[in-house]
Image (cartoon, rainbow, N blue to C red):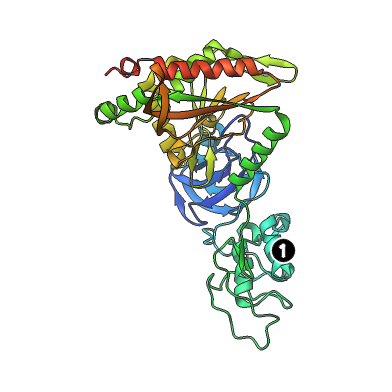
Amino acid sequence: MTSIQMPQLGETIIEGTILKWLKAEGETVERDEPLFEISTDKVDTEVPSPVAGTVTKILVGEGETVPVGTELAEVSTGDGAGEAAAAAPADVPAVVTASNAAPAAAPASSEPTTPATTPQAPAAPPAPTDRGPRSQILSPLVRKLAQEHGLDLSSIAGTGAGGRITKADVMQAVSSGAGAAAPAPGPSSAAPAQAPAPTPAPAAPVAAPPSVGAAATGDVTTAPLSHIRKAIATHMLASVNETARAWTMVEVNVEHLVRLRQDVKDAFLATHGVKLTYLPFAVRATVDALNAYPHVNSRIEGESVVTPRAVHMGIAVSYDAGLIVPVVRNADAMNSVGIARAIADLAARARAHQLKPDEVQGATFTITNPGPYGSLLSVPIINQPNVGILSLDGIQRRPVVIEGDAIAVRSMVYISMSWDHRLIDGEIATRFLARVKQNLEGWDFAEDLGV
């Protein structure tokens, strides 16, 4: 028998939320086959099984947040192979630890993959407490939904692992009109989507919820914050509260970059397999400016200034769960082609929820790129512990004054930077942005692209 815990997926990860079990009790799993999905405050990821065998018991239900090292499940290997795997050092230890997530539990799945009852319970228990101390753990979402609908949680039998009351249990009680005054019907044999039973005078008619995880009240729908949104909120509030944020902007003529990209984008895609955007140009120009003004690439630790020798560029990427910042390591050692490939790879894997926790940590500076979405001018929040974040907004054709006091239509863009006044002063911030502008307007990026 092998005890499955969640692996330490990153140095700063201390807890994690079980998003979904990919195997139910009684099902077999192969070694390295995905066993469950977890969410951290950095990324969502699948965790493979370190052993082959049969899942005999699931100890932590979907939507629950537990610390690293918590036992999540038991897998029977039958031949001792699991115990050997647990003792041997491996990339994914047999004792996997729950690793990442926001401080509060994320909403549970509407379709539990764990069996309704555990093998030890042939009959419905009088109360979930018969299943042990774990049954007393209730997520904030479960308590909130029960309070909103006036349900007595002690009358609802949990179908989650270890007898826990899940969100699905609460919503079924709401749908069936049970749980308000009398004990809920026997737990797990009822179908999850059972229609309301005709009872002689229900306490109050309650409409079926519009979706699992959301509660309808009057003309509004209330849904819990996701774990990603909670993590983003915590990180952004900490930045606003702890930094002395200032802001500077420059206007850049990128006419030659627009023409260059138009000329080579098809050949670039055919040669390198990724689309050519303006972001690699901005990263290259910014990396050079960071080398010229290393304080902008620094961070504050206590009363010390830590300045890395390398530039690890954070690139803000929007995806279905919110915003994430994967890191292009050693961007100062790459040309525009290498940067374009790295950004395309990280962005694709971010949107597919395939990033590793270490790939979203360690940025020394950050660039956000709201331009493709129509933004004209942005004031981004600093991605701590960075002391600066640059925003590349939308490129627009507009009339400008050129040499000889002539007026011409050119492709122009605003590039701005939010910076921490605790470490950077206005002169450095302005010189830094002027260097970025100078690079974008004056560099021969065709040579850098090898075209």
Residue 241 found in image quarter:
top right
Where residue 319 appears, x then y in whole percent? Answer: 48, 43
Where residue 235 appears, x then y in whole percent? Answer: 65, 37
For the residue pair 63 and 248, the one nearer the viewer reads as: 248
Residue 360 found in image quarter:
top right
Q: Image check: 238 left or right of 35?
A: right
Asked whether the viewer can see residue 331, the reply is no
Where residue 415 appears, x then y in whole percent? Answer: 50, 27
Q: Is residue 116 above or below residue 255?
A: below
Mark 1 is surrounded, within 10 Å at the Cα level, by few (under 14), some (14 to 19) or many (20 or more) other residues, namely few
Q: Quadrant of the C terminus?
A: top left
Q: Is residue 25 above or below residue 430?
A: below
For the residue pair 109 and 240, the one nearer the viewer reads as: 240
Dot 1 amino acid type:
Asp
Q: Is residue 197 above or below residue 286?
A: below
Q: Residue at x 46, y 38 (%)?
A: 350
The residue wearing badge 1 is 130
Mark 1: which secondary structure?
helix
Where residue 35 appears, x then y in whole percent? Answer: 49, 47
Asked whether the viewer can see residue 344, the reply is yes
For the residue pair 88 and 373, the one nearer the viewer reads as: 373
Q: Residue at x 58, y 62 (%)?
A: 119
Q: Image check: 336 left or right of 62?
A: left
For the residue pair 294 and 147, the one nearer the viewer reads as: 294
